[in-house]
Image: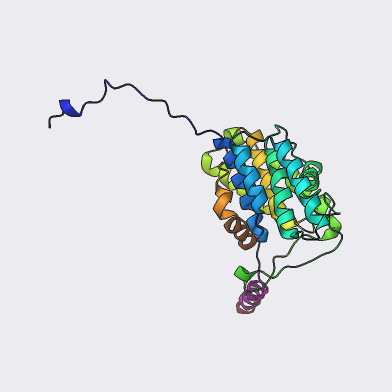
Amino acid sequence: MSEKDLDTSINDYNEINDPKGYFKQLEWDMAIGLQEVDNLKPSKYLEELIEKSILGELTIEEVEKNLKDYYIEKEKQNSINYNELECDFVSIRIVELLSVDNFELSVDYLKYIHKYLFQDVYEFAGEFRNVNFSKHEIILNNDSVAYGDYKTLKESLEYDISLEKEKNYKDMSGVDVIKNITDFSSSIWQVHPFREGNTRTIALFIEKYLISLGYNVYKSLFKDKSVYFRNTLVRGNYFSKVKIYQKINIKELTSSIK
């Protein structure tokens, strides 16, 4: 076969269109995938509603109404699976917020996201925690990240956000953008301002922030990698007592040598 036979330059280009409901599928993938950070799975009923939503047969408002009716019946039967309920409603709230073009880089907006996501689940939705806590992490050999002090949660977040507002991402290289966004995400996650739902809240806050900056966010990342996302935040904010002790000993040893 000659080179001429391999010449396809005369062929027309064919347009490639995203399948129907493609972007809605990505939103649901992120919404459901993020629930994995708390080991939550959706109900079979929500999965049915999602399929109809993606095909355009149901609006998000109709999905919400049908789901509320479903859980009203479940309550009458005293057969509610509360893990599924949390997954179902928080997933819907994520999709709803992703469909709204608004964002504010502020502590109030972070609280707003938490309140919106967990309005159907927690009485303390949108409220900062009023206790200090720790959490045993498998990847830390059951040690815990040192979370922010509950007495200074607002001040800590305001400090991180004030630094973020000084940045100009338009003048940064791609590598610098990634580093700065990663550092900011890690910092506000470490504060851990809420009793529950911090990772899901921070993930959505950062996604909407990136969208407001003009970036396209790869939502499918959270479909299968949300646990990896959280574990990365855990490891990035971990300073073990052993390491701290080792540093102290090294410092004392250095001083004694001098």
Frontmost residue, 86 versus 110 = 86
Q: Is residue 238 magenta?
A: yes
Main secondary structure found in the magenta portion? helix
Residue 215: image quadrant is top right
Q: Is residue 33 left or right of residue 18?
A: right
Residue 204 spot, x, y in % from top left: 68, 45
Frontmost residue, 162 versus 148 = 148
Residue 210 visible here: yes
Q: Is residue 234 left or right of residue 194?
A: left
Residue 152: image quadrant is bottom right
Residue 71 spot, x, y in % from top left: 77, 51
Q: Is residue 255 magenta?
A: no
Frontmost residue, 193 versus 239 = 193
Above or below, 181 relative to 245? above
Residue extending farthest to the left is: 1
Residue 184 visible here: no
Magenta residues span 237-254
For the point 58% across and 50% down, the residue is 222
Residue 253: image quadrant is bottom right
Residue 57 spot, x, y in % from top left: 63, 34
For the point 33% across and 21% down, the residue is 12
Residue 163 spot, x, y in % from top left: 72, 44
For the point 82% across and 64% down, the residue is 132
